[in-house]
Every structure is written in structure tokens, then in C-alpha cells.
Amino acid sequence: MVTIEFLGPIQKAPLTLDAASLHDVAKALKQDSEMAQWLESCAVAVNDTLVASLDTPLKSGDKVSLLPPVCGG
């Protein structure tokens, strides 16, 4: 099981999923129409390290963070 956390304005409670890769996480989150919109623009981190590929493998206990874009100055 991996924990998915949603940062910033997404405002969803963390959830746990049985996922072997980020492909599995994306597939599960796309079932929620609100989350599907966020997935288009979010950066993703696994255990606090940014990743760019959905092929990233996951293991039990990993933390996946969805980081929405922010404006700053």
C-alpha cells in the first residue's frame, strides 16, 4: 500500500492505494473527475523526490505527493 497526499489547493484527504507504479496511481485517480483535471498540471514526488515518469515503481510504504502549480514572487 502507498499513501497519496494532495498538497495545496487540492483539499483532499490522503488516501492509500495498492499500486506497483505511478501508472496505477494515475489510473485510480482518473476515476475521480475532479482529480483528473489536477493530474494534467501537477508535479509528482515519490518519498519527497520529484519524478517525471509514470513508469516509476512503487513499494509498500511509499508516499506519493501531488504538487499543484503555484504562483509566487
Image (cartoon, grey):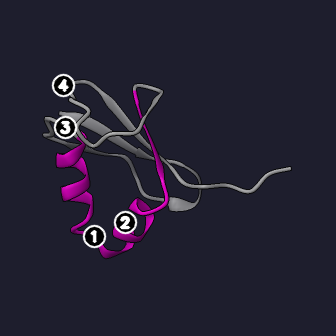
Identify the mark at residue 48; answer none if there is no mark. Answer: none
Residue 43, magenta (yes or no) = yes
Going 34% across and 68% down the picture, which residue do you hit? 36
**Residue in view at x 44 percent, y 64 percent:** 38
Marks 3 and 1 in Cβ contact (< 8 Å): no
**In the image, what residue type sits under mark 4?**
Ser
| Three-letter code for the amino acid on which mark 2 is drawn | Met
Residue 19 belongs to the span the image colors magenta: no
Instruction: Give SS at disc 1.
Output: loop
- Kindly report which numbered mark, 2 or 3, lies closer to the viewer in this rendering: 3
Mark 2–mark 1 distance (CA, rounded to whole Å)? 5 Å
Magenta segment: 22-46
Please name which of the two marks, 4 or 3, marks the residue nearer to the observer. Answer: 3
Q: Which residue is mark 3?
A: 21
Q: Secondary structure at mark 3?
A: loop
Amino acid, disc 3: Ser
Of the numbered discs 2 and 3, the one sitting upstream in the chain is 3
Q: Amino acid at mark 1?
A: Asp
Q: Is residue 52 left or right of residue 8?
A: left
Q: Earlier in the sequence, mark 4 or mark 3?
A: 3
Disc 2 marks which residue?
A: 35
Say few, some or many: other residues with alpha carbon within 10 Å of mark 4 (under 14 / 14 to 19 / 20 or more). Answer: few
Mark 4 or mark 1: name the one nearer the start of the chain. 1
Is the Cβ of the residue at disc 2 closer than 8 Å to that at disc 1?
Answer: yes
Q: Quadrant of the N terminus?
A: top left
